[in-house]
Image (cartoon, rainbow, N blue to C red):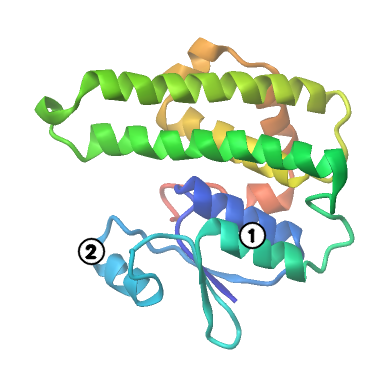
Amino acid sequence: MILIGRDLSPFVRRTAIVLALSGLAFERRKLASSKPEDLVEIKKLNPLGRVPALILADGEALIDSNAIIDYALETSESEVALCPADGPARRQVLRTSAFAVGVMEKGVASSYETLTRPAAKVHQPWLDHILNQITEGLTVLEKLAEERVFKLDPDPNLGDVNSVVAHDFITLIRPELVRAAAPHALPALSRHFNKLPAFKNNQWQPNKS
């Protein structure tokens, strides 16, 4: 299998981590939709020009991180389930994931506002609204992480993956928001799981990807 996309995208990174934790072998093609020559290749797999995409062994292409992660969970070769099959534990993992993915989405939206628009075209009230959503999301994730860090399992669940990726992404693109929120449990969660190969080997490295 071949995973398309760079780890700068939190959606690509969370997908890569889940594939690795699921024990599935895959290669990387770190294409960027922001590069015209890469976009041509990406659109052959996803006409929307979005990453990630996963090319299966038979040539089928899966698009969107949710679909790829669902495939990884379905075909996982790991003995440890990233998401409980049912009950309150499953709902808690999915709830945490929903908040974390929301933070990722708003982080990407904030980047579009400031990096792709001329300064005179940025609508500051809208940007402030997006940044506030990120801050509120980080606050929720911090509270959830406080409950998690005191009973850390050696194996992360899907909520942990998404929380760490969201924290790391916002720390990268909006460090002032993380400093203002002054979280403690969320960075601790990040440090703990980023020691694992699945996380460590799928991090944004500007000079390599």
Quadrant of the drawing holding the N terminus: bottom right
State the residue at coordinates (66%, 62%).
Answer: 70
| Residue 193 located left or right of residue 120 | right
When asked about the image quadrant of residue 97, the answer is: top right
Q: Provide the residue designation for mark 1.
A: 69
> Disc 1 marks which amino acid?
Ile
| Residue 134 located left or right of residue 162 | left
Q: Position of residue 169 (x, y in %)?
A: 50, 36
Q: Provide the residue designation for mark 2.
A: 36
Q: Residue furthest bottom?
A: 58
Report the number of discs: 2
When asked about the image quadrant of residue 47, the answer is: bottom left
Distance from disc 1 to disc 2, alpha carbons, whole Å, reads 27 Å
- In this rendering, the label closer to the viewer, 1 or 2: 1
When asked about the image quadrant of residue 34, the answer is: bottom left
> Disc 2 marks which amino acid?
Pro
Residue 164 in sight:
no
State the residue at coordinates (70%, 42%).
Answer: 94
